[in-house]
Image (cartoon, helix red, strand yellow):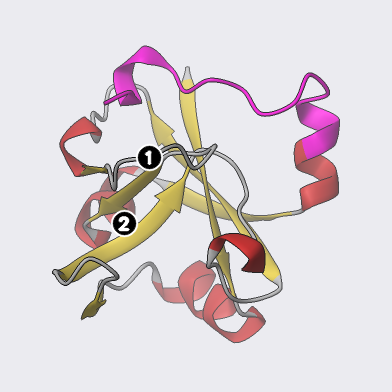
Amino acid sequence: MDQFFYRRTTEEKADSILRHGFRDEEAPYLIGINAKGVWLSDRPVDCNEGATGDTLLRVILPCSVDISEHYFDEGGEKGYKEWLVPASILNSFGRAERYSDAAYHEDHPEGFPCSPDIIRA
C-alpha cells in the first residue's frame, strides 16, 4: 500500500525534480522559523492556499515510510495537512509523477480524503 502526497510547482522545477530528484528548499516561513525540506500536502493546494506554479506532482511513498515527525502544524484549520520532508527521504524511498487536479478529482469523487493513520499527526 502506498501513501500519496502532492506538490505544486513550476513546470521547470517539476522537470528538474523528475530528472534529478527533490532538493531541500530553505527559506524563512510565515511564523518566523527557517524551514528546510520539501513541502508536501495531503491534497492538491493552489495559489489561494499559498502554492505557486501550474504543475502538480503526486509524490508516492510506501506506507512503511513514516513521515509523521515531519508533520507541520500551524494551528487552526486549513482543510489540508502539510509536511516538511527532507529531500533525502523522498529521493531514497519515494517517486514523483506528473498529476493533475482533474485526475485527483476523478480518483477522489467523494472529495478530499482523510490521511492514512501512518501519516496523521
Give the image quarter of residue 43: top right
Is 114 part of what is drawn in magenta?
Answer: yes
User: Looking at the rendering, in which quadrant would you find the C terminus?
Assistant: top left
**Residue in view at x 61 percent, y 22 percent:** 113
The residue that label 1 is drawn on is 76
CB within 8 Å, label 1 to label 2: no
Q: Position of residue 40 (x, y in %)?
A: 42, 52
Residue 91, labelled with which disc? Answer: 2
Mark 1 belongs to which amino acid?
A: Gly
Mark 2: which secondary structure?
Answer: helix
The vertical placement of 116 against 18, above or below, is above
Residue 52, labelled with which disc? Answer: none
**Residue in view at x 21 percent, y 58 percent:** 88
Task: Specify start and end residues of the magenta stretch as a single range.
Answer: 105-121
Give the image quarter of residue 12: bottom right
Is 84 part of what is drawn in magenta?
Answer: no
112 left or right, relative to 67: right
Label 2 Cα crowd, 10 Å radius (few <14 / some 14-19 / many 20+): some
The vertical placement of 34 against 8, above or below, is below
Q: Which residue is nearer to you in this view: 98 or 119?
A: 119
Task: Name the outermost residue toward the bottom.
Answer: 12
**Residue in view at x 27 percent, y 42 percent:** 73
The vertical placement of 33 against 94, above or below, is below
The vertical placement of 100 against 50, above or below, is above
Camera-nearest label, 1 or 2: 1
**Residue in view at x 58 percent, y 75 percent:** 52
Mark 1: which secondary structure?
Answer: loop
